[in-house]
């Protein structure tokens, strides 16, 4: 059985052949010895992708999670990072300048705001590999701008279809992202390539603390804001998507982020837009200077008083340690209960994003009764004095009103309504009104079940799950999945930094 397993793995690309022509053992063959077979397999599997700019890369389109080998050339180097470019790729990027930006802006910003990266191979370097990411992107689809593969933090397993480079690597797209970069720079917008490096570096640094267990909207929202902190913001596409501007990909069905919840992650532009905008608000509210705000972010990643920003309510526990909360009477104006605090901040944020100015108990409804959020507006205001918005985006007000009928309001989702205020006596729901003109209805719960009310409509993003037959032994796949889920037993860095 061991021999058969090795042969199946070795010839996994020939699924049909193996199914109809199973290998037959011959007692006289030298391959009858499983030790020799394992040794041979290891040599063949390792020799094709090691050293000289060769790296294992995840094929994102693969349903088996397989990796393939990419050959690249070293194109730039600086303190803390080496930059490689896939052979045959010409993205039109000055990597010497990219290396300089990494050294002078990106690395110092990340060090200050979230911490330093692990160094499992003890070379003091992060590999930043620019390649044509295999993501199935077309001219009319979205694309993967960059990613971090946690498999690289683990011991390489020659039996796995997902191979580990056993080092810290950022994978950057050199095709669609390179084209987007040209347009952004010509429009006078921040460089999305450099912004993506800062974004992905946050993921890489965070993983040694989270082990992949943090809620996605917090992880992604933090990465989005990190691009700003590093000097490549604001994220114009995200802000236009939040509003639903005609020039964005979020102008219809629904308008902007209406009806979208960041807590049900569908990997859509709306998820990123919502998470970025709200996390940016929390970042600005956490202090009055870059130093105090960065301290809050570092607490959300590394932890403070046994809490990290791992979910919505733990994030509030961390927020209690921020100078903004401590110095602005947080326990009095926001409360010390994390569940209530999150609801109040999200409700205020959504109302303020629409330009509402009154947050008295006659204008705000939460958990079955009126409640004043005026002190939040005074002590934790949503303002952009230190956050210059792009031309044409003076605020986050939705460009259109969406009126729904009978449906459920998923936690985190919100709608801008017009006309007479609908039924509001649903426990757990909230609204903020703007006189008699319009109002925001939302479910501010950070997690939980949907809330049903006749004036609510929900068009939730559905996560796309990659399913399908696997030509490797199903048992082997199951073992690999279990190994990844229990990977803290084989991480190459200290899991208690």
Image (cartoon, grey):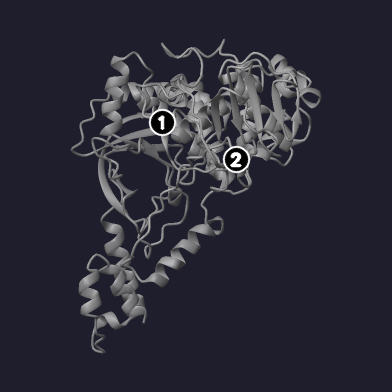
Q: Which residue is mark 2?
A: 411
Q: Report x, y in % for residue 425.
A: 70, 35
Q: In the drawing, what numbered circle is on residue 197?
A: 1
User: Would you place residue 292 above or below residue 19 in this image?
Assistant: above
Q: Position of residue 298 (x, y in %)?
A: 62, 31
- Image spot of residue 362 (x, y percent): 73, 20
2 or 1: tag closer to the N-terminus: 1
Depth check, front residue: 310 or 425: 425
Is disc 2 surrounded by few (<14), some (14 to 19) or many (20+) residues within 10 Å? many
Residue 282 percent coordinates (x, y) = 62, 26
Could you tell me how many numbered marks the image carries? 2
**Residue situated furthest bottom in the rendering:** 27
User: Closest to the observer: 67 or 224?
Assistant: 224
- Decide if residue 147 is on the left or right side of residue 288: left
Above or below for 451 versus 416:
below
Please give left or right for residue 423 compared with residue 157 in the image.
right
Q: Residues within 10 Å of mark 1 (few under 14, many from 20)?
A: many
Residue at point 54% right, 59% down?
486
Give the Cα distance between marks 2 and 1.
Answer: 31 Å
Q: From the viewer's side, name the closer residue of 65 and 268.
A: 268
Disc 2 + disc 1, Cβ < 8 Å: no
């Amino acid at each position: 059985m061991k021999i058969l397993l090795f042969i199946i793995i070795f010839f996994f690309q020939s699924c049909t052949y193996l199914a109809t022509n199973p290998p037959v053992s011959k007692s006289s063959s030298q391959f009858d010895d499983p030790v020799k077979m394992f040794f041979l397999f290891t040599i063949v599997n390792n020799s094709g992708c090691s050293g000289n700019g060769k790296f294992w890369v995840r094929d994102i389109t693969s349903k088996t999670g397989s990796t393939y080998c990419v050959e690249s050339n070293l194109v730039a180097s600086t303190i803390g990072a080496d930059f490689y470019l896939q052979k045959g790729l010409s993205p039109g990027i000055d990597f010497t300048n990219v290396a300089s930006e990494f050294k002078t802006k990106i690395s110092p910003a990340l060090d200050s705001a979230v911490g330093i990266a692990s160094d499992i191979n003890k070379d003091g370097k992060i590999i930043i590999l620019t390649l044509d990411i295999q993501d199935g992107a077309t001219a009319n689809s979205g694309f993967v701008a960059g990613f971090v593969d946690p498999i690289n933090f683990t011991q390489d397993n020659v039996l796995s279809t997902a191979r580990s480079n056993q080092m810290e690597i950022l994978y950057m797209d050199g095709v669609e992202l390179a084209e987007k970069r040209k347009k952004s720079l010509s429009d006078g917008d921040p460089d999305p390539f450099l912004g993506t490096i800062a974004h992905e570096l946050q993921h890489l640094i965070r993983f040694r603390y989270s082990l992949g267990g943090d809620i996605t909207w917090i992880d992604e929202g933090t990465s989005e804001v990190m691009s700003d902190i590093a000097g490549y913001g604001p994220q114009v596409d995200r802000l236009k998507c939040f509003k639903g501007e005609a020039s964005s990909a979020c102008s219809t069905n629904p308008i902007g982020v209406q009806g979208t919840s960041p807590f049900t992650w569908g990997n859509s532009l709306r998820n990123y837009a919502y998470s970025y905008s709200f996390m940016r608000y929390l970042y600005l509210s956490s202090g009055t200077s870059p130093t105090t705000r960065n301290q809050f972010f570092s607490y959300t990643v590394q932890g403070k008083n046994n809490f990290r920003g791992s979910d919505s309510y733990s994030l509030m526990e961390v927020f209690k340690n921020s100078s903004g909360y401590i110095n602005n009477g947080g326990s009095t104006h926001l409360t010390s209960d994390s569940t209530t605090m999150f609801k109040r901040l999200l409700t205020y944020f959504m109302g303020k994003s629409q330009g509402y100015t009154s947050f008295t108990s006659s204008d705000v409804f939460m958990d079955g009764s009126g409640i004043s959020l005026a002190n939040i507006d005074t002590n934790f205001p949503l303002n952009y004095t230190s956050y210059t918005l792009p031309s044409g985006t003076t605020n986050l007000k939705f460009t259109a009103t969406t009126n729904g009928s009978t449906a459920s309001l998923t936690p985190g989702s919100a709608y801008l309504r017009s006309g007479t205020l609908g039924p509001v006596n649903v426990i757990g729901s909230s609204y903020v009104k703007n006189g008699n003109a319009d109002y925001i209805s939302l479910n501010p719960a950070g997690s939980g079940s949907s809330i049903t009310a006749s004036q609510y409509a929900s068009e939730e993003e559905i996560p796309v799950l990659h399913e399908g037959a696997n030509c490797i032994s199903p048992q082997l796949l199951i073992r690999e999945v279990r190994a990844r889920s229990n990977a803290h037993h084989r991480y190459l860095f200290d899991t208690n930094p």
